[in-house]
Amino acid sequence: MSALPGKRILLGIGAGIAAYKSAHLARLLKQAGFEVRVVMTEGAQAFIAPLTLQALTGEAVRTSLLDPEAEAGMGHIELARWADRILIAPATADLMARLAHGQADDLLTTLCLASHAEKFMAPAMNQAMWSHPATARNARQLTEDGWHLLGPDSGDQACGDVGPGRMLEPEDIMAGLSGAVKRPAEGLKVVITAGPTREALDPVRYLSNHSSGKMGYALATAAVALGAVVHLISGPVALPTPSGVTRHDVESADDMLAAAERLADDCDLFIGCAAVADYRAEAPAEHKLKKRDDENAMTLRLVKNPDIIARIAARDARRPFVIGFAAETRDLERYGRDKLTRKQLDMVVANDVSRAGLGFGADDNAAVLLWRDGDAIDRDPQPPQPKSRLAEAILRRALTRLAPLHHA
Ligand code: PMT
């Protein structure tokens, strides 16, 4: 565990019989070099005394949001900022429901809402409660919100039932924390297009655009980090290949289409982030075009390029889940929705490329994610943020839509 970045962990303890295991967990965290602060819900104190955790961590245990004495030390917002990670073990069905709904009705839920820390929870509850559609819905929501769910395990339960809902053993929770558990996109085959295409006019000139490749490369990096096998079809850009990614360099839309068709044959998720030129010269000149002194204008005849993403989405066989981008300068959502429907995509990332500091060439981006949910179109607006973070948000959102297909 010594390689773990971020050594400040807030251990939240919920009201379950598994709370007694949290004492051992606190000890393991300390042994792994974490600075541990403990927050207990009111109910948790019926299962294990705060004093036990205080003795194990050497820190006062926080139990109440409205404790003036504790707030005078490290206030709850300060505590929320202090944590690199939050781990809730055990996480009861009630705690999951409150967190899934963004409630802040006690110290632990308030801290979770106020903190940007990476968040983990080890659910623990009766098997029927775990299998209930409401808990399943909450678990999905929490995963979408970025929580890592560790477990639960299956087996004998304290109530006499047998089934899923047992809290993972503390050692397994530790393994989950260090990333030893299955990552959400483990084994998923992802193909991403990135950068611009270049459409030759003659041997030295071309039509292109300002795409730097940053957004597509950020997606490739994030997909690898989530465990996916990633092929990146890249137009000409000045970026290094992200580690773990197989890169296929192309120039024109036709080249990109050929690579996309080939790689899509063995692909679960296809993301078209490239800024593909919509048109190319009908007949690129074999030799360099000469400037003519007797003419002030020149006419270039352009023909339409193939629509790569629409071709992939129109497949009958071997059709992956398809995410397209929509680069717009006005009516962002209207055009995004139109592309979702017209190109038969599963999701669209609509980004406004007229905003300074965002979109083409920038390190940051903002977008509205759009996807079909039955007859309706659902949306998830993403504020301006580094492309790396937006990339992860796009992938996590896609994974929630894709998971049933992937595991089928
Ligand atoms: O590369 P960066 O500098 O980081 O900038 C990122 C970006 C702005 C290029 C990126 O976020 C983005 O918006 N990419 C899509 C750009 C684009 O071509 O959008 P579009 O609205 O014209 O195309 C819609 C979708 O169809 C896109 O998924 C595109 O890849 C795809 N397409 C378009 C034309 C075509 N002939 N074939 C396609 O597959």
Image: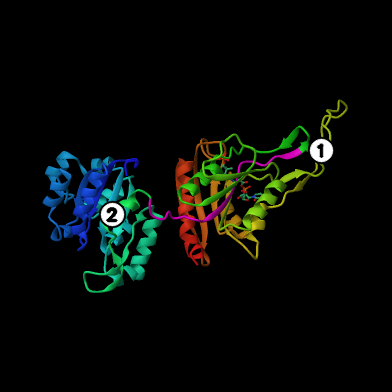
Instruction: Give residue 233's position: percent from left, percent from top.
Output: 62, 46
Q: Where is residue 168 shown, x and y percent of the image?
A: 29, 60
Q: Can you name the residue that lies furthest to the right here? A: 294
Q: Which residue is mark 1?
A: 299
Vertical comparison of 163 with 60: above or below: below
- Foreground residue, 174 or 280? 174
Residue 24 in magenta? Answer: no
Q: Is residue 352 visible?
A: no
Q: Position of residue 202 (x, y in %)?
A: 79, 35
How far is mark 2 from mark 1, CA to CA?
Answer: 71 Å
Reading the image, the residue beneath label 2 is 171
Task: Give the SS element for disc 1.
Answer: loop
Q: Secondary structure at mark 2?
A: helix
Task: Left or right? Give the position of 379 relative to 118.
Answer: right
Q: Quadrant of residue 7?
A: top left
Does residue 41 show up? yes
The quarter of the picture where residue 91 lies is bottom left
- Residue 336, percent across and down? 57, 53
Q: Nearer the viewer, residue 131 or 104?
A: 131
Q: Main secondary structure of the magenta part?
A: loop
- Residue 126, above or below 395: below
Given the image, on which type of amino acid does mark 1 rest? Thr
**Residue type pointed to by label 2:** Glu
Tell me if residue 190 is in the magenta stretch: yes
Circle 2 Cα neighbour tier, 10 Å, few/some/many (<14 / 14–19 / ≥20): few
Q: Which residues are magenta?
A: 180-200
